Image (cartoon, grey):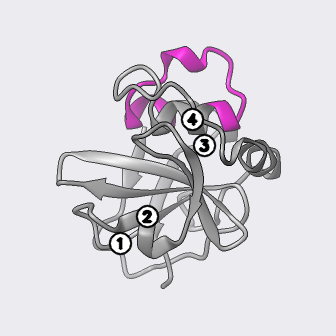
Amino acid sequence: MAEILYRSKQVVIPVNGSVVCCGIFGALTHTGLWVNGGIIELSGSGLVRTVSPERFIHDRSGEQIYVMADQHGQVLSSVTAADFAQARIFEYLNYDVFNNNCHRFIANCYQFPDCHEVMLFADLTHKLANYFNQPVVFYPMLS
């Protein structure tokens, strides 16, 4: 599982391959992958695209982007996942809010076995914690 530190004073700077997230209307979480100063995401239209941090949180309830790190604030990332995500930009995927969403896209970028099992943010963070062999924590991004 992961923890999102909504009120943390510690902030982190993402690196290529970092998973980032923001809130959606107080109930859900949207995820993307930080690459070269932008965020690669699977949009609701099915388009894999790069957006600015400002666009990533636009029209969502969250005003803050959170970056995946370890319990000590060291950012966790994968260059392989960043490369995989970059190769998918401008592709259209068959988006489905339950069966092929942003969380599954990130799981695919990390090339997790059994990606089809990822539906929720909790599913993704469980796989990320296993991948990095430690709990994952989401800290506010330095803006």
Q: Mark 3 points at which residue?
A: 134
**Which residue is tagged 2?**
56
Within the magenta stretch, is there residue 81?
A: no
Q: Give percent across and percent down for residue 68.
A: 54, 57
**What kind of residue is marked 3?**
Gln
Q: How far apart are marks 3 and 4 (CA)?
A: 21 Å
Q: What residue is rendered at 56% in x and 68% in y?
A: 73
Q: Is residue 33 left or right of residue 2?
A: right
Type of the residue with mark 2: Phe
- The residue stretch that appears in magenta: 108-126
| Left or right, residue 123 beside residue 114 | left
Q: How crowded is mark 3: few (under 14 residues within 10 Å), some or many (20 or more)?
A: some
Provide residue 58's location: percent of width, then percent of height.
33, 68
Give the x, y percent position of residue 77.
70, 54
**The furthest residue to the bottom:** 143
What residue is shown with label 4? 105
